[in-house]
Image: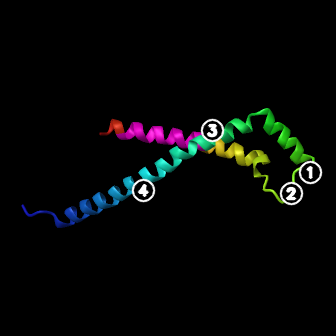
Amino acid sequence: KMADINKIKEMEEILNKNTKEVEDFRKALEKFKNSQKDYKKLSDYYSSEEYMKDLEESNQGKIDPEISQGIFSEDLVYDLLGDNYYLAVDMLDLATEIIKNN
C-alpha cells in the first residue's frame, strides 16, 4: 500500500502548528506566572483598610481627577479577580485532560 501523502501533509501541518502553539503558550504562561506577584499585591490592596480610605478620598474628590482611578471602579478589580481565578481553573482542567489522555 502506498503512503497516504495527504495524511502525511496533514500530520506535518499539525506537528508544526502545535509546536508553535506550545512555544507561544509557554511564553504566555511565563508572563502570566510572573504577573502573579503584582496581582497578589493588587488583591491584598483591594481587600485592605488602606484601599477603603483611598476609595473614600476618591469619592470625596480629594484625589486629582487627572490621575487614573480605575482601581476604585469595583467592577474592574472584581472582574480581574474572577478572570484570574477562572483562568487558573481552566488551566487546571486542561492540564488534567492532557495528563489523562497522555
Badge 1 marks a residue whose secondary structure is loop
Q: Is residue 11 above or below residue 82?
A: below
Q: Amino acid at mark 2?
A: Pro
- Main SS class of the magenta portion in the image: helix
Q: Earlier in the sequence, mark 4 or mark 2?
A: 4
Q: Are marks 1 and 2 in contact (CB under 8 Å)?
A: yes
Q: Which residue is mark 4?
A: 24
**In which quadrant will I find the C terminus?**
top left
Q: Position of residue 101 (x, y in %)?
A: 32, 39
Left or right: 89, with 50 as reference point: left
Q: Earlier in the sequence, mark 4 or mark 1?
A: 4
- Determine the CA span between mark 2 and mark 3: 26 Å
Give the residue at x 21% y 66%.
6
**In which quadrant will I find the N terminus?**
bottom left
- Determine the CA span between mark 4 and mark 3: 25 Å
Badge 4 marks a residue whose secondary structure is helix
Left or right: 2, with 48 as reference point: left
Q: Which residue is mark 2?
A: 65
Q: Which residue is mark 1?
A: 61
Q: Amino acid at mark 3?
A: Lys
Q: Amino acid at mark 4?
A: Asp
- Determine the CA span between mark 4 and mark 1: 44 Å
- Determine the CA span between mark 1 and mark 2: 7 Å
**Magenta region: which residues?**
84-98
Residue farthest left in this picture:
1
Give the residue at x 66% y 39%.
41
- Determine the CA span between mark 3 and mark 1: 27 Å
Q: Which residue is mark 3?
A: 40
Q: Position of residue 15 (x, y in %)?
A: 28, 58
Q: Earlier in the sequence, mark 3 or mark 1?
A: 3
Left or right: 52, with 28 as reference point: right
Badge 2 marks a residue whose secondary structure is loop
